Every structure is written in structure tokens, then in C-alpha cells.
Image (cartoon, coloured by chain):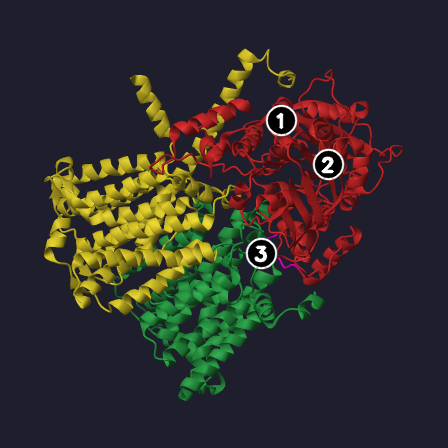
Chain colours: A yellow, B red, C green
Amino acid sequence: MIDTLKNSFARLRRSSFFAGFVLFIIALILNAALQGPASFFSIKSINTLFAKNAAFILVAIGQSLLLIAGTMDVSCGIQLALVNVVTIMTHQVWGIPFGLSCLLGIGAAVLASIAVWVCCSVFRLPALLASYAMTYVIRGVNVMIMSVPQGKVPREWYMAYDSQLFGLIPVSFFAVLGVLLICRFARKTPFGSHIYAVGGNPRNAFAAGISPVKVQLKAFLLKGVIVGIAGLCLTLMIAAGNPLQAEDYGIRSLSACILGGLGFGGWGSVASAVFGSGFFVLIQNSVYYFFSLLVRMIPGFSVSSYWQNFVSDVIIFLGLLMTIVTAKGRQEVLREGIVRQFKRIDYRKKPEGLDGKEAASHE
Amino acid sequence: MFELRGVDKRFDAVVALNNASLNVKPGEVHALLGSNGSGKSTMIKILAGLVNPNAGEILIDGSPVEIRNGYDSRKLGIATAFQDLSLIPTMSVRDNILLGNEPKNALGLVDQRASDEIISRLLERFQIDCDPDDYVQTLMPSTQTMLEVAKAVALKPRLLLLDEVTAALHYDEIQVLFSVMRELKEEGIAMVYVTHRMNEVFEVCDRTTIMRSGESVITGPMDDFSLDDIVYYMTGQRPDKSKKDVVHSHSDGGREIVLDVKNLSIFPKVHDISLRAHKGEIVGIGGLQGQGQPELIRAILGAIRYEEGEIIYDGEPSTFKLPSKAVKNGMGFISGERNREAVFPARTVLENILAGKVAKGKTFAYMPAKANRSFAQSAVDKYNIVIGSLNHPASSLSGGNQQKLVVARWIAMQPKLLLLDDPTRGVDIHSRLEIHEILKECANDGMTILISSSESEELLSLCDVIYVFYEGCVSAQLTGENKTPEKLVAAMMGMSEDHEIVSTMEAKA
Amino acid sequence: MNSTQSTLTLGQRSKLFMQNSPARMAFIIAIILYAVTVMISPGSFNASAIGSIVMLTLLLSIASAGQTIVLIGGGMDFGVGAVMSSAAILTTTIMNSQDGRFFPLLFAALSMGATVGLLNGICTVKIGLPPLIVTMAISNVITRMQYVLTQGSPMGYASPSFIKSVTSKLFGLQFLPSIILYGLIIIPLVFYLLNHSRFGKQVYLLGNNPVAARLNGVNINRVQILTYVFSGMFAAFAGMLGAAYMNAARCQIFDEYAYNSLIAVIIGGTSFSGGVGTYTGSIAGSLVMVVLSNLLTAMGLAQPTRNVFMGLIMIVLLILYNREKKVRQ
């Protein structure tokens, strides 16, 4: 029993997301302490946390797929706004049922993803810059579709989003869970290992008969669907349309993934994205409670929204600094692996050294 | 029957293949021989789908086929073990072996049980000792190479291409490989075997095709060739037995010690290495690939950290944390990995020669254009570097001239200690000899030279002392009488001196 | 070389010309774009319009000087805009419409730029993340700081003499704004740094092949950090001039210069992958950007269309200059 526990801890210790996991737990404890555990672990608070941040977590998951495949997309933030704008406007202008508008919204995200794929994989442009340029294009398109913030979501839709199943589990949680299950399934198909091969070394993947362009297309399509779902979560959460929101999700999701332990290409897992984005969410939450704690404790203390923004951007920056820790973790894993391999060879050599081939015996 | 006919390939200005041909029959091991840069690897890469030929055709059983990518190649029954490996280091052993060939179950998922069985049978057959879930990057270079071959064999190919796979293998691993190759031969599988080691060729190969500067010179059964014949077809010259290299040598007595390495350990490759270089001496480091030679040289330069031991340079313990510090203190470094570590391809010839001068000195100092030009021009003249103009990019030069450029860059700086890591890799024989002459001259003028090389010939003709590395330790130190090809090769393979070995000779460049 | 060129088709030849002499190409594009503008609205062809083109081109050239150095060194600086805005705010706050405060301001602005550059440099080098992400995160922090420190509305104006030194007309000629005098100091300085000092040569080596540069004895971390420091300082100086041009400042006033300077430098033929590029090209690229912006205005395009346009230009430029190698050779 203890042995299996020990073993599973050793496995966790070696996993690529270990550093991200530790950071996540630290943020969780910090948040719970600042907010008061009773309040933090209440159904209402967890519901709000999920409802507000499901979109961000989903975007990070989508981003992680691309990172594994050796590419990336910083325009997926503004793609959320695209989904939002398309969903609201098709419902408002064409008068089609809201459910259909939602599907169109997801379709828009998939189209945008394909456009980025064409730039990054087909034209072989540097992914970071090409997708940054796409941010401009999509932003323009958004404003063309919806010039000023407007529109609303049918009441029953956003009420449903904000409710809990069985009075316990928030609906937004199911969106995240569903996407995670899809990723889990995909990991077990051949695609799940091809994506790592293409990200880890495209030339060698190509030599093994895998087409990097096709595998990246699949990753982009999957990411498009995930961003579409994320965009719907965002739309149902704010229950209105805004063409210029969530742009910073692109870069922030990237930082979250890297913070969670993903490398650029072929290293890490979707779990990294979950822990990394979870860390961001909880830390930002903590900042809010930290400030309200200050307000309560110091009479006459007040905070402008400028300060809150400032602190949250400082935290994103500090989060990037933290990636040094994750990079260290990665080196540590590599080193341990080599040491284990050495031990194995030594172990093999000593008892069987006598019947080993003549060459091995020479010192 | 697999056939390549009249294949041409140019990389920009460089002609890699010129009307080359190859035909391989089922159930034979076909040796593809040639010196560095003669186009062997390009041939292999064409069959593997990695290189697109400019002209020529590929025939299988008499009918022309097209190989546009790795997938086509695999589908036609061709599997390749590459010299620079096609494993993905960040993936597990299991995923690597199955890559692109995963057994699937009804749901479209990877069938775990079937794959476990494939893996364990394969590891057993090749006697590879590793956990299938380990990342490939944690394995020893020789184990990785075995895995590369195993992965190719796992595809059950009709044609197996082995591109210099034994370069990093140990003696017992080579024996395992050969026994597998003999089994495959029985099964009627065709194999192309590229190597530099002549004794292996005579041991396992049935026929051979010899290449010289991109052309296939001759094809025939192995029995028709002697070693001398092969060298003749590869180089175009009969090996001259009577001519002995004039070995540059002198006594160590009283000479000052420039470099003294004591009990150095570098994780994970190097354990407890000691060596010593005197002023004006050429010290060689030999050994198979991946025995810790590059690591040692980089540790001396301050480019990587070492765990234990001491490096005494110029009478003082060196604590260089960066190459820039080492260079300031009179070291120079020439790497054979031209593209990655030495040449600035987009910059001009002038800037490339000047790079040593650029590295040393006050950061914001003025560098007069005229002085730069004359400095570069004199280096070009002195070392016979063939260039179009000083203003052409370095990428416009041939490989040999690029390497001379790098050598000239450092010789012109007159370093106290010059470190060279396999400096003549992929360099044509003419340039190689010129580089050797330059180095000998410098040593006579009092420069200390530490050179690592994968070519035994180079070490034997150039060095005063040869330290041979095996698994990160010094397995032999050869000087004077002891500097024979036999002893060098034996030490490289980790064999004791009394062990009987076939008269072995590395391919003459 | 010449013999092969003669056999090329026109398309191949023009592609070669574009890739080999991007600076000249950019000047030609700028002239064509300007001609189109004049055709669309003939009224825009006059001395004062040309003067404003000169003014904006110089401003963008000075802002992109640092960007050029950073890009050649293999990095990227997205903090240019934020530093310019901050320097502009510093200018109006410190000067507060009073003369005689130029040198304290210069000192304050340059040290602010250098500090931000240092932070950018150290973080990119140490974190090992793409510079775009790191510099963007830092520039966000700086932008937020502008709001925190000014409560969202910066005070004051640049001093009258400073404004005059930037905007008055030399010899009374409408098309010669006096910002040219500042340009005469900055541009030669950049040329010295990039082309004639050891530092510049180290930057080129670093950008072309960082591994080789390091093993060759270049202290690559130090050089890389220095490129960001210069970028910060040039951006700060450009921000001061910009404040004089605009009179007053607000938060984020010059933020778009981050993206614009990047595109200007790329149009000028400097490569994203580092090691290739010239400052002449960046000046030409700045001219293209300014003339293009005029043209879009003349065509009466709205903001969203301009956004799409700017994004597409970047992608076209990437396709022209920065495609990665094919896997199969």
C-alpha cells in the first residue's frame, strides 16, 4: 500500500506537470486562506469561479494542443470575441434560434483556426508572429460584424449556464470536463503520439511517414472546436456582445501553458495547461480578496481599478518569471532518467559480467 | 529488386549526386562505400523520402515508383536507420518504436497489449536493456542507435537501409546487429549497409557499390575487391604504402605544461578523465562517437559545467564560466559542426574571418573597415581559401573552404591553446591535408593544440599523444611506438590489448 | 552569378531584387504608394503634407532604431510603444510648459528607457521564452503603471522651446521640419553602433548563429541585453520628440508604435530570425508605413478595415522574407 503510494508519488514527481501542479496547490491554499476556507469551498463560490474562468481554462487547453504539436496561436483570445460576436449577431440579425447561432459561433472559431493553420503550417511562417498578425485581422473582422458592444443572450440560456447540476456541479465544469475527456481519448489514438512526434522533431516524424502539416491541421481543428466552446462559455457568462474583449487571453493562455510545464514542441501534457491556467485563475482571485482584506483592515483605504489591473499584470509577469522553476523541473526529470538508466546498466553488468561479451569486461 | 538509376541531386550550388545508380537484390547485404561527402547519405535519404532528387528514377521489381515522403517509402517496404537517428528524444521508447505503425483496436485506439508484445519481442531480439516507458533522450548514444535499427526492423521491410549505424556502437552490440542482419538475410530481405569500417564490410556484405564525389564508380561482388581496391575506387589513388607520414614529434622534457586536466567528471558522459598538454604539442583525443570527447573540450572552453575535478590552464586553475572568458585568456575553438557551431552563413566571408577579432576587445571600440579588410584578405591569401569575394556570404563557399575559413579565423588570432572538435568532418581530402599542414606549422611555432577526431588516420598522422576515450574514461594513452592503427582501434572498441582483432582500417578520406 | 541571373524569368528576378536589396525596394514602394495617394486626392500634394510625412517618418525611424538592433540580434522588442508613451508622459509632466528643463528630462527619460530595456533584456535572456511574450508582458506592466501614477490623466505640456525645436520649419521651408536636426544626431549614432563598432559586429554574429557566437567567445547574454537597453533608450528619446510633436500626452498615446516599428523594420529587410538587416532599410520601411497610412486615410478606410489590412501586410511580409525551410529537401 505504502509502496504503491510511493510509486505513484515518484511518477507524479517525474511528470512534466509536477512544477505546475505544485504552483497550483500553493495558489489554492493561498486563495482559500485569504478568502476563508468556508467561503472558498462553498458551492456558490466554486460555481462563480468556474463560470467566470471556464473560457480561460478551455483556451489554455486548446493552446496546449498546439504547443505539443510544435506551433501556437496567440490570436485565440480575440477568436473568443469572434465567437461571441458571431453568436450574438446571427441570433439578433437573422433571428435564428440561439442554439443554431451557437453552432455558427463554433464554426467561426474553426474557420479562424484553419486560417491560422494555413499561415503557420502551410506557409511555414513563424507561428508566434503569424498568429499575432492574425489577431489584427480577426479584430478588424469582429468590428466589421459588430461595431459597438450590444446584444443580449436569451435569459434561459445564461440562467442555465449559471446553474448547478444536481445542485452541486456547475454546468461550466461540464464544458471543461467534456473537453478534457475528448483530449484524453485523442491521446490514446495514434494521433495522440503523432502530435508529440511532430512537435518534438518534425523531420524525424516526416521520416516515420507522418505528415506534420496534416497532424497540425488536426490539432488546429480540435483547438478551433475547443475555442468555440470557450467562446460560448464567455458569451453565456457576460450575456452580451463585445467585439474587442478577451484579446489578452491569447498571450495569457500561452504563459499559463508554459508555467504548467509545457515546452515548445513535444513536451508536456494537457494537464500542464489545466494546472497552469488554474494557477492564474486562483492567484487573480487571491489578489481580489487581498485587496478587499486591506480595505476592511485599514480604515479609509480605497483601491482604484487602475491598481487592480496593475497588480494582475504584475502577477502575469511574475508568472512568466516562475517558468524558470518549471524549466528547472524539466532538467531535473531528464537528469533523473539518465541516472536511472545508468543504474540499470551497472546492475546488469555486475551480476552477469562473467558471461557478458568479451568487450564489456575491459576497464 | 530495388534500383536507383541516373539520380542527380544539387543542394544550391553543391552537387551531391551526379548520375548515381544503385541496385540491391533480395537476400543480400549491399555495402555502399565512399568517403565523406561522396553522396552515400543522400542516396539513402532519397530512398527514405527525405530528399527530392532533381533527376533519375527509382524502380522496384522493374516498375518505376515515386517516393515523395516517408509515408511512401514505408508503404513500398523500405525502412531506414539513419546515421543521425530518426528517434524523437522527448518521446518514450515505446512510442518511438511504434511511431507511424501503431497497432489499432476496433475503437481506433492504440492497442496496448499488442504493442507491449511487439516492444518486448523487439527489445529481446536486439538485447536492448531499457524500460519501454523511458524517454529516449535518457538513453546512452549506443542504445539509441540500436533502438533506431530495431525500429526500422519492426516495420518488417523488404529493403532495410542502415546508414553508418555502427559508428557509435560497442563491440558486443555490433555482434548482435550482425546476427540479426544474417537472420534477415535468410528471410530474403535486401539490405543496404553504409559504413566506414572496412572489416565489417568484409564480414557481412555480399556486394558493394563504391561512390566518389556523387558518382557511383563501380558495383560488384565483395569477393572481387581487396582493401586496396576499395580505397582506390573511393579516392581515385592507390594507397602509397612506402610513404610514411612525417610525424611531428619532440620530447616533453622541460616543456611547460599549458593544459592539465585532473580527474574531470562531467555528467553524464565523462568520468574521471586526466590528460595533459605541453607547449607546442598536438594532443589527440580518439574514440567512437559519443564517448565524451565533445564534452571534455567544451568543459575546457567553459561552455559547459563540470561536476568534479580540476582544469589547470597556463599554470592556474581555470574557472571560466563562459567561452568569452576563455577566449579572452588566449583559447580558441574550432568545431567540426560547421553549420551549428562555427560558420555564420548569412554574414560575409570578411565578417566570418573577423569573428575571432570581434569577440575580443572593447565592446564599443571603432573597428576601421580598412584594417578589417586587410586582415581578412591576408588570411584568405595565406590559407588558400577559395572565395568569390570578401563580401559574399559564407554560405556561398564549399564545405572545405568554410572549414578553412573557421581555422583561419582562429589561427590568425594566435591563441595559446587551440581546441578542435572533429574539425575535418565532411571536409574533402585536399582541404583536410591543408588544414593538417596549418596545424603542424602552428604547433612548431609553439601553439598547443588539442584535437578530437573520429578519423583514426587523422589522429595517427597529426598527434604527438593520443588519448583514447571509451565510455567516458581514458582507455589508452598512445605515444611513440604504441601509435599504431591496431592499438588505436582496439582501444576505441574498449578491447584489451591482447585481444585478437581483424586488421582494421578506417576508410581513407 | 551574373550568367545565371540572365536566364531567370522576370518574376524570379524581381523576387531576387526584393530579397537582395529590400531597402531600395522599400523606397520604390513608398514612391509608388505616394503617387497613388496623390492621384486619389490631388490636394494632398503640397509642402506641408510632405513636411508631415518627413516628421512622422523620422519619428518612426528613431523609434525603430532600437527595434532594428534588437531584431538583428535575434530578439524582438514589443516594449517600444509602452516606453514611448511613458517617455511622452514624463516629458509633459517634467516640463510642465516651462523651458530649461530639457536636460533633467533627457536624463530621466533615457534612464527610464534603459531600465525597461535592461529588464526586457535580462528577462528574455534568463527566462528563455520567446521575446515577444516577455516584452509584451513587461510592456503591459508599464502601461498599467502609467495609469496608476497619473490616475489615468497625465498633466502638463511640453515646453514651448522644445516644441519649437521639433516642429519649426528650417529656413522657413514647409517640408523641412526641424526634427531633422535630431535625426542628424541619432541616425549617424545608430550607423556607428551597427556598422562600425565591435558591438554591432557582435550583434550580427549573435543574430545569425547564437551557438557559434557563444563558442566563438562572444558574451552573447551581455550583447543581447545591451540591444534591449539601446532599444529602450531610442524609444524613450522618440517618445520625448513625439510629446513635443503632439504638445500633450495621454496614457498609451504611442502604443501602436510597437507594432508599426516592427513592420517598418521588416519591410526594410531585417529578418525575424536575426543576423540580417540594415538601418537604412528600417528608415525606408518607416517611410512606407507613413505613406501607406496616408493612403489608407485618403481612400477613406475605416479602422476595422485598416486593422485587417495591417494584419495582412504583416503576413505577406512574413511570406516574402521569413518562410521556414521545408522538411523535405
Alpha-carbon neighbours of circle 3 within 10 Å: few (<14), some, or many (≥20)? many
- Residue at position x 13%, y 54% in the image: A157
Alpha-carbon neighbours of circle 2 within 10 Å: few (<14), some, or many (≥20)? many
Q: Name the residue under label 2.
A: B208
Q: Is residue B197 shown in magenta?
A: no
- The chain letter for the residue carrying disc 3 is C
Instruction: Kindly state the secondary structure of the residue where label 2 is placed.
Output: strand
- Secondary structure mostly seen in magenta is loop
CB within 8 Å, label 2 to label 3: no
Instruction: Kindly state the secondary structure of the residue where label 3 is placed.
Output: helix
Residue A174: % across, % down? 20, 43
Residue B8: % across, % down? 68, 52
Whether marks 1 and 3 lie on the same chain: no
- Residue at position x 42%, y 34% in the image: B103
Q: Mark 3 is on which residue type?
A: Tyr
In primary-sequence order, the first of circles 1 and 2 is 1
Q: Name the residue under label 3.
A: C204
CB within 8 Å, label 1 to label 3: no
CB within 8 Å, label 1 to label 2: no
Is residue C80 among the parts visible in the rendering? yes
Q: In this view, does A12 lie above or below A247?
A: above
Q: What range of the chain is rendered magenta? A: B360-367
- Give the Cα separation between the discs numbered 2 and 3: 47 Å
Q: Name the residue under label 1.
A: B186
- The chain letter for the residue carrying disc 2 is B
Q: Mark 2 is on which residue type?
A: Thr
